[in-house]
């Protein structure tokens, strides 16, 4: 009898526990299982998207691969590449494939002397990547496109005050080029010197180019400083107070 009562008590206790906790238990199980399968579905979706983007990007590269270096792409090739790039930008924006596609479109635009379109593509690339190195690559190219359009103030703003990291030397060299375009040889000299200090010691071609640029502005830079000192001396003598 005691055993029978104990069993009934256990059943009643189980019923009470179920009434109090059953719904929460089911919900927890559903959320756990649902979360697992939801995560699986999401990772599968991401993988599928990456695979789709890879195929589109590979098609872009296939359109370019048939041409020799420096050879102009046919009109239809360019149209196909631009369309594929737009597909990547619209459907896979934020991916490395879309970033690379925007750079390719910008390059084609530059080759067609359409600098305004190149600037649009490079601005898009800079705005749609979270990678610092990517941002700096797009920023530097955009600055050079702006300089090519004689927007030198804009070009300088793009390369100043930037943590360029491993691209610091390239940024300093660009500053030198932009200052030289403005006719500011002294500032160009300073920028080229900074670029030379930061360039890889084993990159002999980059060092040679920078040394050439420095030699072109160094005499002017020295003359400018001497002229400024002479002017200051003359002003002091004219106004001894």
Image (cartoon, grey):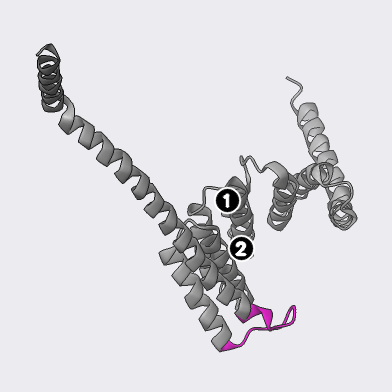
Residue in view at x 53 percent, y 54 percent:
126
Secondary element at image label 1: helix
134 and 38: which is toward the camera? 38
In magenta, the rendered stretch is 63-75
Can you say which quadrant of the picture contains the N terminus?
top left
Q: Which of marks 1 and 2 is nearer the N terminus?
A: 1
77 and 158: which is toward the camera? 77
- Tally of numbered tags: 2
Q: Residue 227 carries which label?
A: none
Left or right of 227? Residue 25 is left
Residue 26 in the image: x percent, y percent?
A: 21, 36
Residue 224 in the image: x percent, y percent?
A: 81, 44
- Distance CA(mark 1)–CA(mark 2): 15 Å
Dot 1 and dot 2 residues touching (CB under 8 Å): no
As drawn, 110 above or below 30? below
| Residue 119 showing in the rendered view | no
Can you say which quadrant of the picture contains the C terminus?
top right
10 and 95: which is toward the camera? 10
Q: Which mark is residue 135?
A: 1
Label 2: which residue? 145
Residue in view at x 67 percent, y 79 percent:
65
Left or right of 16? Residue 89 is right
Disc nearest the viewer among 1 and 2: 1
241 and 173: which is toward the camera? 173
Outermost residue on the front side: it is 1
């Amino acid at each position: 009898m005691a055993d029978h009562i104990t069993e009934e008590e256990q059943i009643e206790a189980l019923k009470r526990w179920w009434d109090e906790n059953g719904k929460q238990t089911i919900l927890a199980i559903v959320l756990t299982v649902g979360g697992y399968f939801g995560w699986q579905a999401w990772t599968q979706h991401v993988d599928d998207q990456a695979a789709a983007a890879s195929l589109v990007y590979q098609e872009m590269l296939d359109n370019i691969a048939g041409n020799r270096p420096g050879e102009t792409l046919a009109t239809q090739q360019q149209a196909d590449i631009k369309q594929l790039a737009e597909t990547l930008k619209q459907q896979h924006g934020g991916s490395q494939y879309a970033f690379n596609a925007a750079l390719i479109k910008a390059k084609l635009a530059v080759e067609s002397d359409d600098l305004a379109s190149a600037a649009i593509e490079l601005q898009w690339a800079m705005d749609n990547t979270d990678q610092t190195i990517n941002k700096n690559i797009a920023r530097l190219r955009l600055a050079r496109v702006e300089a090519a359009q004689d927007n030198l103030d804009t070009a300088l703003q793009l390369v100043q005050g930037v943590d360029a990291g491993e691209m610091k030397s390239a940024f300093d060299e660009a500053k030198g080029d932009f200052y030289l375009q403005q006719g500011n040889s002294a500032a160009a000299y300073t920028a080229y010197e900074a670029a030379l200090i930061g360039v890889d010691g084993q990159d002999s071609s980059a060092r040679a180019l920078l040394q050439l640029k420095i030699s072109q502005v160094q005499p002017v830079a020295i003359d400018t400083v001497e002229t400024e000192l002479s002017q200051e001396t003359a002003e002091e003598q004219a106004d001894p107070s």
